[in-house]
Image (cartoon, grey):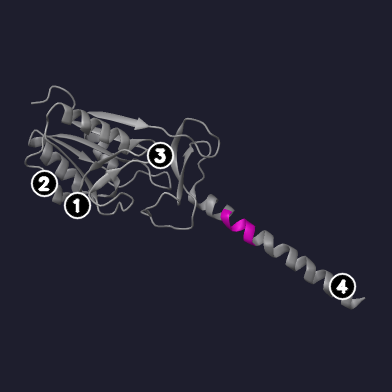
Amino acid sequence: MFSGYRFEMIVGCMSAGKSSELIRRIERARLAYLPTIIVRPTTDTRSRPNHVESRNGMASQAIVVDSAKDILKYSSHAVVIGVDESQFFEDEIIDVIISLLRQKKKIIASGLDLDFRGKPFGPVPHLLALADRVDKLLAVCRKCGSDFACRTQRVVHSSEQILVGDAQYEARCIHCFEPPGEYQLRLDLPKIEQAVPQLVLAAQEAVELAS
């Protein structure tokens, strides 16, 4: 049925415009009168119920699913299927995508390619290998202001791979990105610095008492 791409992947760090691009491509398919759906995992709690939303205000109705296999329940009448936040799905999303492609569906998926450690995120590396079109979007680095942010910096204490929320992260370029161990250590430094003056004062009082 399709003469163009069959499986498109849109990846990048946070704030790179992945969801916006996904919505834009789905809207183009709708303009071509192709039946479409967008699905997202329940893990993503930032959007309104039954919607997928981008940080720049774009939104579209979506089906929220508990697992990747649930996508098959809603895909029968769709020709083009959008998948947002694909990194949050378990590895079964790989077999689901393969099954949909065998059914002559077109898939457009978006997600983080790297986690907060700068490591490949969930099933996304495998999905990238399967895709026949891959677009890696960049964001503005929140530290130096360059247009080449490709990492997601976690700015709070947590070792969990999945921690949903915008306030806990910021986009960083590869030069400004700090691995979690180094960044967590730097977050602890102010506590140590605050304790130093108290130790100095205690030492001064001891000297005064002795004299």
Do the CB atoms of the residues marked 3 and 4 lie less than 8 Å apart? Answer: no
- Amino acid of disc 2: Tyr
**Which residue is the site of mark 4?**
207
Name above or below for residue 23 compared with residue 31.
below
- Amino acid of disc 4: Val
The residue positioned farthest toward the right in the image shown = 211
Magenta residues, as a range?
A: 187-191
Do the CB atoms of the residues marked 1 and 2 lie less than 8 Å apart? Answer: yes
Quadrant (top left, top right, bottom left, bottom right) of the C terminus: bottom right
Do the CB atoms of the residues marked 4 and 2 lie less than 8 Å apart? Answer: no
**Which residue is the site of mark 3?**
15
Local SS, label 2: helix
Local SS, label 3: loop
How far apart are the two marked residues, 3 and 2, measured between alpha carbons? Answer: 29 Å
How far apart are the two marked residues, 4 and 2, measured between alpha carbons? Answer: 77 Å
Do the CB atoms of the residues marked 1 and 4 lie less than 8 Å apart? Answer: no
**Marked residue nearer the N-terminal end (1 or 3):** 3
**Marked residue nearer the N-terminal end (3 or 4):** 3
Name above or below for residue 88 compared with residue 31.
below
Measured from the top left, where is residue 155 in percent x and y?
49, 51
How far apart are the two marked residues, 3 and 4, measured between alpha carbons? Answer: 55 Å
Q: Is residue 115 magenta?
A: no
**Which residue is the site of mark 1?**
65
Residue shown at 8% from the left, 36% from the top: 102
